[in-house]
Amino acid sequence: MIPSIDEIKEFLKKLGFDEKSINELVEQIEYFETEALERDDIVRDYLKDECIETIVNDIVREILKLNRENIKILDVAAGSGFFTERVRRKLEESRVKTDVYALDITPSMLKRLNEKGIAPIWGVAEKIKESIEIANEHYGINAPKEFNIVLSTLAFHHFLNPDRVLESIKSVLKEDGKVIIVDVLKHEHEELKETLKDTHLGFSLEEIKKIGSKVFKNVRAEYMDVYCEVGDIIVGLYKGVFA
């Protein structure tokens, strides 16, 4: 089922979001609705092939450190599944049996995920556990309640409440699981809040370590040798790993 905007508003009310937060989320959703069909090409323009390959390989290396033959992955705010499908393909090439689910709130992104053979879950990052329960009960998704890996790529700076998102992620993470976040480093380009509907201007390594340490015992954050290019603006990326 691909929900309408009105259905999404009702869904967000049921999850306990106030009117202000709902309006902010709907504004983001409407923006990403316009990007859905071209999202893969937009990501390629932002990152270029060499950066994309570096990100995917780095994520896969982190996942392989778990040394498991079977992996359940949840990609949070997965968008069109651009990175989701590439990570899955690389893991399968390494002979790791991979069950992949992707959570997103934008209707057209859910459709793209489904077309790529990735199980879509209609939901929000701040309420992952509740979103999965609703998806399983009403839409026959049959998604797991816990995952070995929770992944989020180029989405963390869009979240209204990053602390709450990490708490939400922990609620669906297996005890020996791992969280991998790839996102933009802190910058000063305020115009991106309007043009790209960014909520935060990225995060410094110190900030992401501080946020992560509130929720997880083991926190690692490091610079990545990659960058996003938006017009004339170049922004670096970091990787955060939490367990």
Image (cartoon, helix red, strand yellow):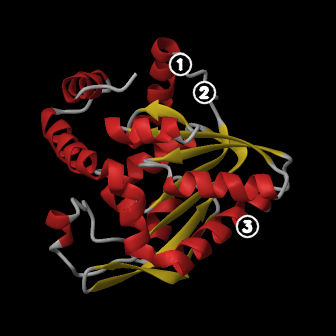
What's the residue type where badge 2 is placed? Ala
Mark 1: few/some/many CA within 10 Å (<14, 14-19, 20+)? some
Q: Are marks 2 and 1 in contact (CB under 8 Å)?
A: yes
What's the residue type where badge 1 is placed? Asn
**Pick the front one: 241 or 97:** 97
Q: CA distance from mark 2 to mark 1?
A: 6 Å
**Pick the front one: 3 or 206:** 3
Residue at the spot x=84%, y=50% of the render?
68
Residue 141: % across, % down: 55, 22
Image quarter of residue 155: bottom left
Q: Is residue 50 visible?
A: yes
Residue 33 vs 140, above or below: the answer is below
What's the residue type where badge 3 is placed? Arg
Pick whichever of labels 3 and 2 is earlier in the sequence. 3
Residue 235 vs 179, above or below: the answer is below
User: Mark 3: which secondary structure?
Assistant: helix
Q: Which residue matches tag 2? A: 143
Residue at the spot x=64%, y=62% of the render?
218
Mark 2: few/some/many CA within 10 Å (<14, 14-19, 20+)? many
